[in-house]
Image (cartoon, grey):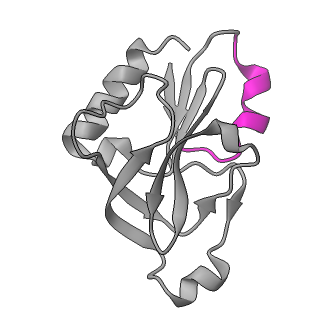
Amino acid sequence: PGIDAAGRVLESTAPHLRPGDPVIVTSYGLGADRWGAWAEKIRVPHMGWNSIEQKKNIGLLSMNEEQRFYFVHSYHLKAANRTDIVATTDYGGELTALVARDTIAGTQFHPEKSQKLGLALIANFLRWAP
């Protein structure tokens, strides 16, 4: 398993993985987009703590309490396939916070800076068997 801050992981990294290798990506870059008109209503870069809403359970999040993670980014993910969206956050509108497909998961937030809940996500990832 690995934690990787590279962008465009599903396209660029997936061909180089062995089948079943789990990968988690922070500051996810696949399909990244600038804020556009949103930037007039919000502060960019987005820096700070935000709650996330789990859309589907894949075993990475421990949703028995409010989930607040630390975000630092100037771009946001526009998931090409909405079925890949695991969690969202609200920052002037709904933003993708966590995506996953096959054995690859990507976060818009930084689990390594998200204290207890970020460590729990990393621990869940190390046990993850999608």
Q: Residue at x 40, y 17 (%)?
A: 126
| Residue 97, horizontal then vertical, whole percent | 49, 50
Q: Establish if 119 lies above or below 22.
A: below
Is residue 23 rendered magenta in the image? no
Q: Establish if 41 lies above or below 77.
A: below
| Residue 68, horizontal then vertical, whole percent | 28, 51
Q: Residue at x 46, y 82 (%)?
A: 42
Q: Establish if 81 lies above or below 48.
A: above
Quarter occupied by residue 11: top right
In the visual, does 116 lie left or right of 16?
A: left
Q: Establish if 130 lies above or below 42.
A: above
Q: Quadrant location of the C terminus? A: top right
Which stretch did the figure color magenta?
5-18
In the visual, does 50 lie left or right of 66?
A: right
| Residue 57, horizontal then vertical, whole percent | 47, 28
Quarter occupied by residue 125: top left
Q: Residue furthest bottom?
A: 40
Q: Residue at x 43, y 70 (%)?
A: 46
